[in-house]
Amino acid sequence: MSVHAHPDDESSKGAATLAKYAAEGADVLVVTCTGGERGTVLNPAMDRPEVRENLAAIRRAEMEAARDVLGVRQRFLGFVDSGLPAAGEPLPEGCFALAPLQAAAGRLVALIREFRPHVIVTYDETGGYPHPDHLRTHEVTVAAFEAAGEADRFPGTGQPWQPLKLYYHGALSKAWFQTMHDAMTARGIDSGMQAVLAEFPADVPAPQFTTQVPCAEYFGVRDRALLAHATQIDPNAGLMLHDRDVEREVWPTEDYHLARSHVETSLPENDLFSGLRPRKVLISGGGVAGSTVAYWLRHHGFAPTVVEQAPALRQGGQAVDFRGPALTVLERMGLLEQVKERDTGIGDCTVVDAEGTPYAVMPSILYAGELEVLVDELIEILYGRAVQAGVEYRFGDSITALEPDEDGVSVTFEHAPPERFDLVIGADGAHSAVRRLAFGPEEDFAHYLGCYYGYWETGNHLGLDHEGMATGDGETAALSIFSVKNNAAARVGLLFKSDELLAYGRRDIEAHKRILRQRAAHLGWQTPALLEKLDTTRDLYFDAMTQIRMETWSKGRIVLVGDAAHCAAPTSGRGTSQALIGAYVLAGELATADGDHKAAFTAYESALREHVARNQEIGVHGSQYVFAQPTQEMFDAMAAQLTEPSDEPDADLSLKTY
């Protein structure tokens, strides 16, 4: 964010820097405090009555043209130009220089909180020159920089955001004029700068630049932006006269002084983003946790890349529900309404015996929460949001080796060439490859809960209307079917007990189908017909009901999130919410820690350990009662219990705003 007093200031001070960063992909916003209404026409060719009469509108149009040349965004802060009164003359009433500091700073705070810049550039305490608007711009910008990150300052202007670096312009210094004059004179070129140099006091100290940004290749863009301000820039005078080739040779930078910094950086710098360049983060897994943490990391200024073993977004799986803080995460991502549009709208589930006779109704609150969607539709929504934010996805590849050290992680892929990352996040599910490579074999962390589950999609041949039906033997197996996709299809779920882990290949689909048929063959009602649908389904998911329990979720620069770190098992009904919350907290703590991954990982675990433990307790209990012969009294008692907020595992979890 570059904050200036008038239109044309952005083009005469730091314009090549703005153009450079915009061309490199940075989001650049120019804030213009006034409209330049009281300025004068400085280009004789434009000094005409009709121009003077419409100067305010013309200068706004010039600002738009310069903005387009630079490739940046631009906003007016909405104050009126103060003009440049002669000595002893009062400032005009209602002008920017007389605006109350807090009122003016509040407007800029609102823009900072909306745009969320990491770097802000403005004038030093001299204003660059003693124009009252330049002096006020300095005061307002410093005040806003210091207040924007404090939640209790300027309420109602958006979520707090702390810019990390504040710079002052060093443009048009005596050193620049002298260097240019000497270089041009040595080449036999009249610099035309003698008069300007004579205006500087003889004892002006040499500038103490902390940061010089190489941007000579963008001087031409700067010049075009200057010329867009036709009322202010005479193409035959002033800034347009010095030799550009000489300038590129002897002073190829634009210069700044670092006034405030909330990050460590080494001086001198050659980049306003020194200490801030996005840290490269590799995320394994493009599911709920992976896309959520990727979005939030990108939001906080990191450079995340998601690698997903599947060739495209995964399809199939069960419906998932949300409660409490998980809804807050979706809302903060701007996705809550979009997810609500995909709500299954599912109602109650009728439980029947082997002959199909109903004997109990399971209220939807027990399995659908406050909002329920299909997991593959949720993944699609999260993926779209992450891509929109600029997250890179690599499908059809996977991590085969990790070599961490003090400074980063060297990653080997199955297909792509090796690459170096600052951090690696395993969001690749309960069978996480990242966890296996970094922490050890899966059996060290997986705790089997004594049952298996399978899900597959079929046609809605039972004619279910936003409802479900279920049956079971009351001991070893339970089957359910729910309509999905506005009754256009249905999804079947089968759970069965097994005292021992079964031997089969994780990717052996035919073995999965065979096991499901064997374990449910004795069930009555519609079970035979639903098992037949296994032959034609394209999205069967089958796995053991397990939890992942770890003493720590991080090791060096590698960290786990979602099921990879703390799978609570589907019988908890909390896995998706837990993944959303965990991803949000992990990304937020990494942003808060300003690069200190050790502190971030510690804070992440501290925030979620108790929450995860409660969810895992629910998962253990659920893996047992899911097979019990239900009664209406049991369902009613469970539903009544859920109406008590204190009984919700999320009731005591308060999400920070990062």
Image: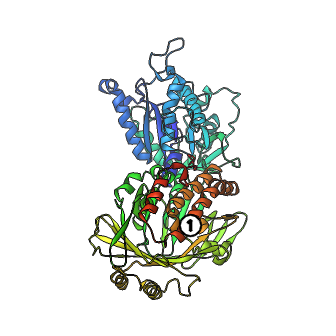
Which residue corresponds to the image point at 54% horizontal and 34% vertical from the top-left? 192
- Residue 200: image x %, image y %? 63, 27
User: Quick check: can you spot residue 416?
Assistant: no
Return the residue at label 1: 621
Colouring scheme, one of rainbow, by chain, secondary structure, one colour: rainbow
Tally of marks: 1
User: Quick check: can you spot residue 137?
Assistant: yes
Circle 1: element type: helix
Image position of 647 with respect to 34: above or below:
below
Query: Could you tell whether 423 is left or right of 57 in the image?
Result: right
Q: How would you rate the neighbour count of disc 1 (Cα within 10 Å): few for under 14, some for 14-19, many for 20 or more?
A: few
- Residue 517: image x %, image y %? 42, 86
Say what amino acid the circle numbered 1 marks. Answer: His
Query: Could you tell whether 508 is left or right of 118 in the image?
Result: left
Query: Could you tell whether 578 is left or right of 370 in the image?
Result: right
Image position of 41 with respect to 350: above or below:
above
Query: Could you tell whether 107 is left or right of 213 in the image?
Result: left
* Quarter of the image where one finds residue 37: top left
Foreground residue, 353 or 606?
Answer: 353
Image position of 477 with respect to 258: above or below:
below
Foreground residue, 14 or 74?
Answer: 74
Work out which residue is located at the far right of the displayed protein and give it.
Answer: 406
Foreground residue, 315 or 104?
Answer: 315
Which residue corresponds to the image point at 45% horizontal and 68% vertical from the top-left? 630
Foreground residue, 493 or 36?
Answer: 493
